[in-house]
Image: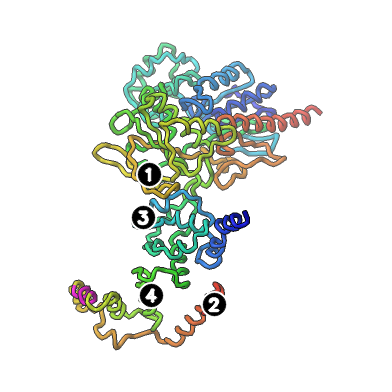
Amino acid sequence: MADVVATNETIVVVGGGISGMTAAVEAAETGKDVILLERSPSLGGRVNQLYRYFPKLCHPTCGMEINLRRLRGNPRIRVLTLAEVDRIQGKAGDYKVSVTIRPRYVNDNCTACGACAEAVTREIPNPFNYNLNKMKAVYLPSAMAYPQRYCIDPSLIGTPEAEKAKAACPHDAIDLGMQEQKLTLTAGAVVWATGWRPYDAAKIQPYGYDRFANVITSVEFERLADPRGPTQGRILRPSDGKEAKNIAFIQCAGSRDRNHLKHCSRICCMASLKQTHYVREKYGDEGQSTIYYIDIRAIDRFEDFYQKVKADPRVRFIKSKVANITEDKDTGDVLLHGVDTEGYHRYDARHDLCVLAVGMEPSADIRAVADVKVDASGFIQAASATDGIFGAGCATNALDVNRAVQSATASTLRAVQVVNRMAKVEGQ
Amino acid sequence: MGDLNTSMIEKYRNDFLKEVEANVEEGQWVKMCMQCGVCSGSCPLGPSWEHPPQEIFMMIRAGRRDEVLKSESMWMCTSCYNCIVRCPRELPITHIMHGLANYAHRLGLAPKMNPTRRFAKIFWDNIAKSGRVNELELSMRLYFMDGFKSGVQKGLEMKDIGIGMLKTGRLNPFGLFAHKGCKDIKGIHKMLKKAYEIEDRKKGFVA
């Protein structure tokens, strides 16, 4: 990585999801040099793991493809994967960003032919599918992965299997001796776009996510609906592989709750409304979706989306936060217990599958690497006039894709201004 | 028109919410309820309540004063605290239920024959007398709460436990005559009198 040249007119973007990619592309297209750091082996982040976006229900491959094309075609962007920031020091216009790069064990020669993966047998959980299935320990992170290069899991190193993979490679792309690297980048401004992670559903003890196979999260449900997912797009429940036609969606699973996340995660209502479309798409009139909610918050322009879903006779809305879930051991069905607010009727409702619309929390704590203010939920607060570190996307708030991209563009604009100021000073 | 208007205003006035906020312990929390229903669903005695807590909060806000204060519902609370633990807004629901029950009792609106109310009354009179519970007297009063016959019946049902307690020294057989109260019984009574005065003044009860 000695070829990474950075000056204090460089913008470092941390996080290679939709926000980070947008920030990198926007900055580079204004003529700035950008280094894009991504913790995982490939770009794309959580958006890539969705089946469809709301409200237009198109596939994320589309939006990602456009961004990837802009990114690939721009010589000003340098992408570093498997890279994590250890520390950011300095001030606006003059930052030193310390980065650790974990070894991929595969170099630039890789053509993604897949011969190495065929040569090994060891399997590991597949994080792209939220560990719902397994994959080879030598893997391409996803079909859309950029860079299109295989990656060897560290657990394979030192085993005979690693040697087998190396022997199978026709392009001499595997380097089992690759070491962890530390480097320090100079930057004028930093865009922090580390995104979100789903709230740990196991912490909502009465819902039994950790005890009942047929209680899953909304992000896992995306993978079940996706043809590239573990079930090839069939909505099958985890306990017995039965088709799940009667599905419950529980809103505010962890959000708007002082025992869990204090904030409203904003996207979950729309996500569940969207996911009722998946049920209809797969099962038609045989499918039944039931949404348990406190309030439906179809934010902003999405009210008409809500109204359309409401008009679907195969979607029921029950105004109630579910109190707890039990499992029928004989059938694997889940039983939802609670009291509804419209009439105060007690219910014990049976469903094939229960999807928890889990909330968003920041995936990384920036305070560990830089002195930046965050709010009560850990989201980055707006920078002051003298700052050069700017939060973008879901690192700053619970946002949908559309708003995350807007946020990234806004932060990029501010980063570009810092770098422009530096250029002027140096020009004098 | 005038009459209709007045009756509608009467229907929606929120005097009762204000009354609850002022006079009921932790009553200021009632307006924070967002009607999610987790308290009602989590309550182990939930199915036995006529109006679950969530509904009580809504009834307070709807100004249904008589229905709330004459209700048996809040007397069902066993203080298991499940609702407080689960409430996404951390409302002290258990305390509000006890506060409502106490307020209804002080106003004389609480259901007269409610067993929880009667037990609470017997317990309080017992402990307030000497500053320390007289266990024998307390259990006797409870047994004979519904008359002589049922008292004897209940006593016979519990006799094995009673004898066991006598043997292990957990029950003083002469408790009715030789109950040891607090050292300063007069002082306790003075304190309680003062506390009543303060509460009555604060909440506008006629002493």
Instruction: Compute the Cα span from label 4 to label 1.
Output: 39 Å
Disc 2 residue crowd, few under 14, some 14–19, many 20+, Cα 10 Å: few
Disc 2 marks a residue whose amino acid type is Ile
Chain of the residue displaying label 4: B
Residues rendered magenta in the picture: B150-156
Q: Give the residue at x 56% y 73%.
A: B202
| Residue picked out by circle 4 | B121
Q: Are marks 1 and 2 on the same chain?
A: no
Q: What residue is at 28 percent from the left and 74 percent from the top?
A: B146
Q: Are marks 2 and 3 on the same chain?
A: yes
Classify residue B163 as left or right of residue B98.
left
Give the number of the disc on residue A396: none
Q: Nearer the viewer, mark 4 or mark 1?
A: 4
- The x, y position of residue A345, in whole percent, is 39, 48
Horizontal arrangement in the rendering, residue A393 relative to residue A324 (left or right): right
In primary-sequence order, the first of circles 3 and 4 is 3
Tell us which disc is closer to us: 2 or 3.
3
Q: How many marks?
A: 4
Determine which residue is flagged by label 3: B46
Q: Residues within 10 Å of mark 1 (few under 14, many from 20)?
A: many
Residue A216 in percent (x, y) is at 38, 36
Q: Is residue A3 above or below residue A183?
A: above
Q: Secondary structure at mark 1?
A: helix
Above or below: residue B100 compared with residue A64 = below
**Residue that badge 1 annotates:** A207
